[in-house]
Image: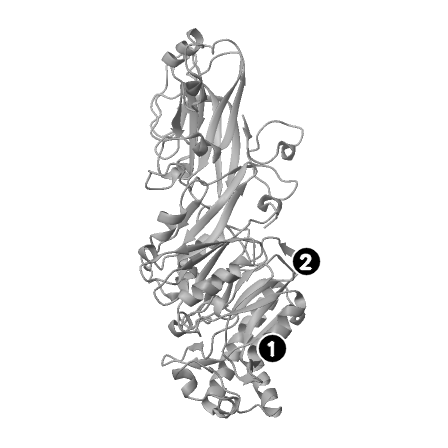
Amino acid sequence: MRRRGSRPSTRLGSSSRPSASWTWGPEGQGAILLVNCDRDTPWLPQEDCSDEKVYSKEDLKDMSQMILRTKGPEHLPAGYEIVLYISMSDSDKVGVFCVETLQGIKKLLLELPRVLPPCVWQYPFFGQRYVHILGRRKLYHVVKYSGGSEELLFFVEGLRFPDEGFAGLVSIHVSLLEYMAETGVKSTLTRPPDLSHAQEIPLTPVFTDTVTFRIAPWIMTPNILPPVSVFVCCMKDNYLFLKEVKNLVEKTSCELKVCFQYMNRGDRWIQDEIEFGYIEAPHKGFPVVLDSPRDGNLKDFPVKQLLGPDFGYVTREPLFETVTSLDSFGNLEVSPPVTVDGKTYPLGRILIGSSFPLSGGRRMTRVVRDFLQAQQVQVPVELYSDWLTVGHVDEFVTFVPIPGTKKFRMLMASTSACYKLFREKQKEGHGEAIMFKGLGGMSSKRITINKILSNESLVQENQYFQRCLDWNRDILKKELGLTEQDIIDLPALFKMDKNHQARAFFPNMVNMIVLDKDLGIPKPFGPQVEEVCCLETHVRCLLEPLGLCCTFVDDISAYHKFLGEVHCGTNVRRKPFAFKWWHMEP
């Protein structure tokens, strides 16, 4: 038995036999399965892997092909049988279909080949049906032996992603079985190994072969990858924001997709509801959206608007844990590829926010953390984000590419950088420069650089917040193998709420959208120095020499006042990595 449509045959060496093991790396071997989590038939309510039927050829293309090659006499001797089987533990993780030619149609094909119109010959299922033979309650299948040399084609689909207690490996076995000697009668074993619930099965395996598949992991895409689509919600109060995002997207080669009010039902936080990723095998790949357990008013969006042909869906819902703000996917990011102490992470590392060790604070729910960890190819790093009111990692860190290179910079919010800039402007004689100019109620308070620097409680609060940021900075430098030269500090200020957690004092610029070299940065409405925002000028000086283009987007009324910014209100689907995940060595 051998597999096809998975890793290239050159990975199998000189033997055409399948491998009962699976190895990582460019010289590794083993077959690959995709979880059949898209929906190729629009009228079905769920993903294709949720049932035991094949409705189209498109569905088959999501599966890996497996060939059982036989060579023998015209008929098997009495007392012998070929059985294909899986273990009970794999029965909810893999499904197998075989193709059967209907006998009546087979006769018609032989006798009346010229009578049938061309459209019938082109119909993909004409004269055939695809029968579910393994998976779920079906643990074994007796193979029809036609004699001589032949190749029997099977289609194999994944049913579950790697997860806690499931490393992602499944095995399919084939055995030539012999009935009891002399009498040729069958022996009844009520619970034989790997063939639970079978009755009247042969006693002795004469020969067994095995192929092991690895189910393709769900992979996140970092900011350095090219954007494909930008998603944003249309709200009653965000027309100007929507217009600015549209203008930004038009500078790029990607498309804007608007989620209208009938679908978002007043929920503007599209970043928090979903995370885009993808799955890939050598024969094909497609995007897969991970649906967060937050289940706000956008909860129907991923299934109703995204799930479809070659667009998959997966979710993880906690049974007993309480869902908190940290379960929203503004708290789920991924770094670009990094090398740490000689260990390469060619697909980057996942970043999630959590509580301070031993503090007993909020933490991302375990089922989501376990799912992310089990994918193996983007080993998660846990950061400290519970010091923030909302508690998301995208409030203090992001990554930008350096155009024309494979390098990147990590951007971090920094209160010390903000105070340093404001003190410089104060020394230059701009202490009375006003923040939030032209914003009505906010500007009427006349917040100046001098007032901010003289507000002792605000200074002390931000010293504490900077210590929280420094804690994360040290973790990121260690876990991503970064140096200070790889990090750019963006000025930020926070204020403490009644629960002693931080919320942005002015629009938090690190919470930006990255579209290749074009950045959509929250407009900070900082102190006006010679009629120009000194925060914008400072950020341009930091980023534009790298070849980046800064566009400052006004989100203050539609997002900032609701404790979010540009990144929180948008989402980006990106192209997959060129690097093939099976070439890495976790």
Q: Is residue 351 visible?
A: no
Secondary structure type for disc 2: loop
- The quarter of the displayed image where residue 40 is located: top left
Secondary structure type for disc 1: helix
Between 158 and 510, the one lying in front of the other is: 510
User: In this view, which residue lies farthest toward the top?
Assistant: 111
- Give the amino acid at mark 1: His
Residue 538 marker = 1
Residue 360 marker = none
Q: Please provide percent x and percent y for residue 197.
A: 33, 29
In-image side of 326 versus 212 (left or right)? left
Query: Which circle's residue, 1 or 2, is located before the other in the chain?
Result: 2
Q: Quadrant of the N terminus?
A: top right
Which residue bears the numbered disc 2? 404
- Give the amino acid at mark 2: Gly
Count neighbours of disc 2 (C-alpha within 10 A) and say few if under 14, some if 14 to 19, many if 20 or more.
few
**In the rendered structure, are the residues bearing label 1 and label 2 in contact, judged by CB atoms less than 8 Å apart?**
no
